[in-house]
Amino acid sequence: MIYCVVPEELAPELYDRMASYYADDPNVEVIIDRRKSERREAGTHDEHRREIRDRRRARVPGEFPQLDPD
């Protein structure tokens, strides 16, 4: 499912256009973002911060072999 999120401030001018544009696509749902504040309050979870990691696969150690220009 793909969600097309329309900010509440732009909903009067965009929601109907986006909903009609994606009406024939069952995998897309147009929704209005009505959040008023952030879910996480700043400074309340300092000791439980999420760990940010690089999930890309580590490169194989070594060098590339020389290629013949033939």
Image: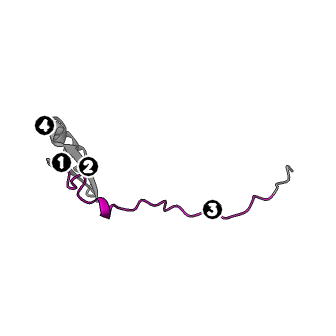
Task: Give me the C-alpha separation between circle 4 and circle 3.
Answer: 49 Å
**Disc 1 on helix, strand or loop?**
strand
Q: Rounded to the nearest whole Å, what is the CA distance between mark 2 and mark 4?
A: 15 Å
Instruction: Identify residue type, mark 3.
Output: Arg
Report x, y in % for residue 56: 52, 61
**How many numbered circles does the render carry?**
4
The label number, if any, that marks residue 12 in the structure image? 4
Q: CA distance from mark 1 to mark 2?
A: 10 Å
According to the image, label 1 marks what residue? Answer: 33
Residue carrying label 2: 4
Residue 51 appears left or right of 1: right
| Labelled pair 2, 3 in contact (Cβ < 8 Å) | no
Q: Quadrant of the N terminus?
A: bottom left
Which residue corresponds to the image point at 69% horizontal and 64% vertical from the top-left? 61
- Label 3: which residue? 59
Q: Which residues are magenta?
A: 37-65
Q: Earlier in the sequence, mark 1 or mark 3?
A: 1
